[in-house]
Image: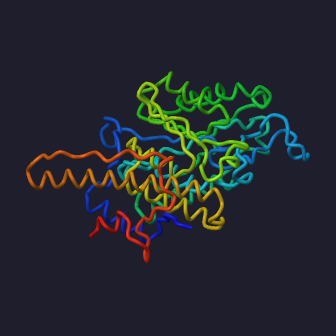
Amino acid sequence: AGSCLVKHTTCRSSLGLVRALQIDGAGGGGGGDEKYGETRLQVITDIDDTVKSSGGLRLLGKLGINIGPALGGLDTQYKRNDFYPGVFQFGAELASYGLPPNLQPAPMAVLTARARELKVFLALKPSTALCVKYNEAADKLFSEFGKGAASWGIDTENTVLYGSVVEWILQSRKGWRKFDNFNKLRAKNDDRVRYVLIGDTGEYDEECGERMVAECPELVRGLFFHVVSEKEWRQLGTDGLQLPADKAIDGVPVSYFRTYVGAARKAFMCGLLGAEELLRVISQAQLDLKTVSREDLKWSDLRRDTNVAIIELGHHLAREKQKQLEILSGSVGMVVEPQDVTEDRADLGGEVDVPGKKRGWLGRWKD
């Protein structure tokens, strides 16, 4: 199948290109007016259908009859407890982006609908696979690229806030509960901390995000929502789930995504990630999915989002090169803006500088 796999060799050459243009740390959009190192970002995440799939399990599902209230979410595209490709890299990159070496990234925070009355069964511990994976991503980011801190991850004693069994019965309370827990989290921090929420469209996370922005828009840097479905993804096939339109609430960007490559691209465009960070998320997402058949719809989603991300990155690099040429020549010319590209317009068969194949925009650029 025609693919746009960004292999490690390609990512390394791409990183070299980014550095050559001296845009290390430069995101694709506005990143706010805070001075370097003045603030730090705390990434807040939901768990089910955000970090890992719920499998669409309902109350009676373990009895062989999958009916009743959803116990964690709706997603059936991924098997229950499967981690989403690139999710841990995305979290580590967000928390570490733009920080000076002497400033420790804020620990990952978790707002979950899991009942605190059942913590003996459901509580996150340092040895929980999810916590281990975040720490591994941070350790790799620090050891290989000198970003963030090797010890970064979830502070299971202080930054995990649970729901209650009430929300399992009264599902509509989940958004309020998560927002209430956000206020408890905020009370533990000072006003220099900014927040990004990562959730999904199936568990009232959008309501939580809207409440956060209404309460303190100056402290929220972005909202990201994973679009999930119980059956629609299978019916749509390679076309993929249609995403709600991105928007802004009181100046806070609200982004919807299918894959964490899509999330990283939108974070890049919002100034929350740089070009190198985006490329690392792409590379890790593909590694995470390497054991899955290339014919699986998961790869269709990832290829589509990767193509769009590479095109957007190419446009960004073109603008940066144009600016440098203008500076060197001492003249200011007219820059023709590239045509916008959306997830639905990406060509699934595009080539991206894969060794041994037709050279894409990265190869032509280096020429």
**Quadrant location of the C terminus in the rendered image:** bottom left
Q: Is residue 63 left or right of residue 127?
A: right
Estimate the x, y position of residue 47 in percent, counting from the top left.
Answer: 65, 44
**Quadrant location of the N terminus in the rendered image:** bottom right
Q: Nearer the viewer, residue 103 or 268?
A: 268
Residue at 35% in and 47% down? 27
Instruction: Looking at this view, name the residue that lies furthest to the right.
Output: 63
Is residue 210 visible in the rendered structure shown here?
yes
Q: Is residue 348 above or below residue 7?
A: above
Q: Nearer the viewer, residue 351 or 281?
A: 351
Residue at 31% in and 67% down? 364
Estimate the x, y position of residue 213 in percent, counting from the top left.
Answer: 49, 26
Residue at 28% in and 45% down? 337
Instruction: Looking at this view, name the residue that lies furthest to the top.
Output: 214
Q: Nearer the viewer, residue 308 or 73?
A: 308
Estimate the x, y position of residue 362 in percent, counting from the top left.
Answer: 35, 64
Q: Is residue 93 above or below residue 32?
A: below
